[in-house]
Image (tube, rainbow, N blue to C red):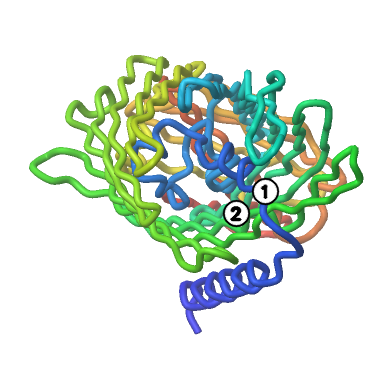
Amino acid sequence: MTGHNVFRSCFLLLFLFGAMLCKASPGLALGPLDLMDRYTGTRAMAMGEAFTAVADDLSAPYWNPAGLAYLHSTQAGTSGTSFFGMTDRFTLDGVYYVPANNMTLALNFVQEGTTDIPRTYDVGGGGIQTGTFDEYKRVFNGAGARQLSENLAVGMNFRFLNNTLDADTAFGESLDLGLLWKANNDLSFGLMLRNIISQLEWTTTTKEYLDRTAIVGTAWRHELMEIPVLFTLDLESHPYFGTRWYTGTEWWLVPDMFAFRFGTNSLPRWTFGFGLHYGGMVFDVAYWKQEYLGEQYMLSLGYVFGGSSASYVQPKEQPQMQIKVLPEAIQPGGSVTITVDDPEDTYLRAAAVFEGQPTIKMKRTKKGYTLTHLLSKEQGTPGDHDVKIYLQNEKGDVRTEVVRYTVSAGPASTVEF
């Protein structure tokens, strides 16, 4: 069985496992709390809420935390919307990339507040208003992700929940798991298991639970009439609503600068929006209309530090390069020299990470980078040893490569990418 077939089998088994978890949900869903979380991410909302196989912006912790693994930059942003003229919702979002550990971490704070809700009492079969009260729902998301291989990433999102309703308060938590597989530069698949464990306990001692759902999605990037286009499709297994579908598309009419988006789903809901990116700035707008709920808008503003905000939309081929490890034959206690050929000056910085040692900056040469490193006792034990090479371009994007040296005897080797 090939590696791809093994992965597809594991992917299917995990989805079936998630579907079984959905059927085993321990209690009634907290509709309003889930409703708040469902409205996360302006770009995702504009694309019909089909984002599981993309998840490459600040909303990744909710849609699929595994997508964070491909965000190799630090980002921050906020979003806001209003429902029915009485409910306001805003988010504060941040992503931080840790190149030394090849991990990406994220924090999100979400608050939805409904004020001046009429308080009524039943008197003689009729309601009499005696005042008003407020309701606030808050979610703190803490997520992390890393690449298991060049094309496969895994992520986890832990949510701390808080709900206040008049004089009553509830606290709780939930856990999400996600996978993202990039079959190639154009095709990707995502899997999200949401609320694997969850609980919300009120001061009244009442306990409630969030719906366990499993979502599988796919995304396809293509060029139509020289316009970069992204198509997405999600299928969700829900314990009470059965199978629900979501689909959307994104058209970069001005590549890496202006995108038009639209989508629909089985809720049913039609969605539209656009994105305006300039340098590191990101401004997104989403609009949707749903039966009984009317028209709604969402706005978001973000910034990508030290990089471009939209280069992830249409993946570009990695520039050809060579990384040489000399010598391949290394005696215990010896040294190893790593050279990176970069004739096009694609990368502004380069660093190497040996096992059990902090990141080492590589020296710039006329044609690339070089580093000669004296191996420690641990690094010089007989056998094969991996070294991670991190290369950062002018946009702030980081490319990661792994090279290998062997503590033995032999000629020099060349590894091509």
Q: Quadrant of residue 351?
A: top right
Between residues 180 and 170, which one lies in front from this camera angle? 170
Measuring from the top left, give residue 29's x and y in whole percent.
Answer: 67, 54
In the picture, measured across the screen, residue 410 lies left or right of residue 43, that is: right
In the picture, measured across the screen, residue 220 lies left or right of residue 20, that is: left
In the picture, measured across the screen, residue 231 lies left or right of residue 188, that is: left
Which residue occupies 66% across, 34% down? 105
Residue 345 in view in this figure: yes
Q: Is residue 142 above or below residue 282?
A: below
The residue sitting at the bottom extreme is: 1
**Amino acid type indicated by mark 1:** Leu
Q: Quadrant of residue 295?
A: top left
Where does label 1 land, which residue?
30
Which residue occupies 41% across, 21% down? 299
In the picture, measured across the screen, residue 252 lies left or right of residue 368, that is: left
Viewer-side label of 1, 2: 1
Which residue occupies 69% across, 35% down? 141
Between residues 312 and 336, which one lies in front from this camera angle? 312
Measuring from the top left, give residue 293's x and y in whole percent.
Answer: 40, 37
Which residue occupies 56% across, 69% down? 15
Measuring from the top left, give residue 411's x and y in whole percent.
Answer: 57, 56
Where does label 2 land, which residue?
178
Q: Is residue 19 above or below residue 191?
A: below
Q: Quadrant of residue 259?
A: top left
Count neighbours of disc 2 (C-alpha within 10 A) and say few if under 14, some if 14 to 19, many if 20 or more: many
Residue 320 in view in this figure: no
Between residues 130 and 218, which one lies in front from this camera angle? 130
Spatial separation of the CA atoms under disc 1 and disc 2: 22 Å
Q: Is residue 48 above or below residue 260?
A: below
Residue 78: give its label: none
**Amino acid type indicated by mark 2:** Gly
